[in-house]
Image (cartoon, helix red, strand yellow):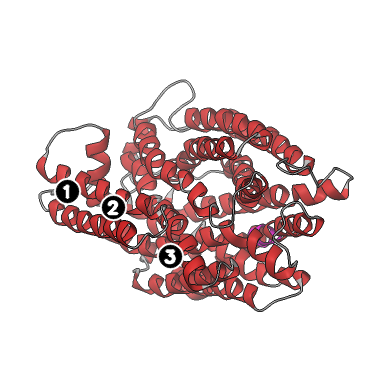
Amino acid sequence: MTRKPKLSFWQIWNMCFGFLGIQFAFALQNANVSRIFQTLGASIDDIPLLWIAAPCTGLIVQPLIGYASDRTWGRLGRRRPYFLVGAILTTLALLWMPNSLALWMAAVLLWLMDASINISMEPFRAFVGDQLPTSQRPLGYAMQSFFIGIGAIVASISPWLLAKLGVSNVAAAGGIPDTVKYAFYLGGAVLMGAVCWTVMSTREYPPEQLVAFADDGVEENVVDVSGAWRVGLLLLALGVAALVAVHGYALEKGLYVLGGGLFAIGLLFLWLSRTRGGGVVHHVMRDLYGMPGPMRRLSVVQFFSWFALFSLWLYTTGAVTSVQYGTTDTTSAAYNEGANWVGVLFGTYNGIAAVAALVIPLMVRRLGLRLSHLVNLWLGGLALISFLLIRNPTWLLLPMVGLGFAWASILSLPYALLSDNLPAKKMGVYMGIFNFFVVIPQLLAASVLGVLVRMFFHGQPVWALVLGGASMMVAGLCVLRVNEPLVGVERAQT
């Protein structure tokens, strides 16, 4: 058996460059879709329910795309066909979204856009594991974080910058401002250009050669699924309890999605314990049930981290416009100024994340992977809580430093902790399953945050950010449960 050769800096640069475009589209979605929904008539209580389609889509698409890409080989390789198809579909959604004529149309386009982004994004994580030896994977994930930061900076500030250049930032009631429209058009061009660069400038190892490398991943475990019925019964019970509570206490209808999702997954685990067949669903559920121990512990960290991030993306526009700008009128100049400032804030934390991607490896040398991630998550948690205390919008730039370090850390260190514990031939499907714990907390946040804000915080969206900050700090504590592999330490010191 041979060892996988190391790649040059520019080869790693080329293979990660496509993430610039993917994140450009993702950041446009995160910073502007709530604004589009509100402009088209959605109330602040409707926003979480309208966002539910996005995490539901990711929950289904990511493991299926991972499974399919593990088994794909053609003229474009293994992962690159998915980069390209996802980019084309996302570009079409980007061009259409700001021209939505009704709220239902924007909601459907969010679903299509998120599905398309996932088609490209999920294989990119596995692409690093495929192409790089273990000693270079932290650099690969850090490079992805760098491009994520750069892409998100430009995307987030695009409406604000276009307004400074004289593009109209106000539209008639129910209309989308030209600043948002042109930002989405720019996003489509950047996405296609960046992904095409990666597709054309990289190559992939054939599957048989990839499995033959001596330093690639771990051996696949044999999974006994006979006990999966216990997990299934627990999830069924939780699902039924949630559905009964929603019906009996007239809770938010979005909670039906959460209860129904728990019930459906419970049924799948019961089915898994009783079948021995093949098929994509059986393989994905078996791998979910039998995922490696380090992956289980990291999944808890991801859960609380991404619950916090989704609260940020859902509620920052509502929080800043109501607290720092004192308005909820979506047609007012103050609201649109505040919404543009949110874009600047998002661009700032993404810019900090690009710098943090270069600093975090130095932190890891000193503190190790676990403590570095804990520190960064706590910086992010305190930053979210500070939105409640700061009144001058300019001073909101300060907590963006903490959010930037947390964002860069979330995008890199969990994958560095995980990458050596996945078998090479199932890198895609396991990366897709790991993203369950990115998607599930988003679904939970979209289901319950609106209820919590309305019932306990008088509909004030800034408190959703406070809850997110607490969740991120819990994630930091959960990192301490994860064993830091010796190889991770050694790599951080090289």
**Residue 60, horizontal then vertical, whole percent:** 37, 40
- Residue located beneath label 1 in the image: 223
Q: Amino acid at mark 3?
A: Phe
- Residue located beneath label 2 in the image: 262
Compare marks 2 and 3 and give the one earlier in the sequence. 2
**Residue 334, horizontal then vertical, whole percent:** 79, 60
Q: Residue at x 78, y 55 (%)?
A: 332
Judged from the image, the secondary structure of the residue bearing numbered disc 3 is helix
Which numbered tag is attached to residue 56? none
- Look at the image and tell me whether residue 464 can be seen: yes
Compare marks 2 and 1 and give the one earlier in the sequence. 1
Judge whether residue 337 is colored magenta.
no
Quadrant (top left, top right, bottom left, bottom right) of the N terminus: top left
State the image quarter where residue 420 is shown: bottom left
Q: Amino acid at mark 1?
A: Val
State the image quarter where residue 344 is shown: bottom right
Mark 3 packing: few (<14 Cα in 10 Å), some, or many (20+)? many
Q: Spot the residue most to the top.
A: 75
- Residue located beneath label 3 in the image: 304
Q: Residue at x 21, y 44 (%)?
A: 268
Closer to viewer: mark 2 or mark 1: 2
Q: Residue at x 45, y 39 (%)?
A: 123
**Separation of disc 3 and disc 1 at Cα?**
27 Å
| Magenta range | 348-353
Q: Is residue 107 above or below residue 439?
A: above
Closer to viewer: mark 3 or mark 1: 3
- Look at the image and tell me whether residue 1 can be seen: no
Compare marks 3 and 1 and give the one earlier in the sequence. 1
Mark 2 packing: few (<14 Cα in 10 Å), some, or many (20+)? many
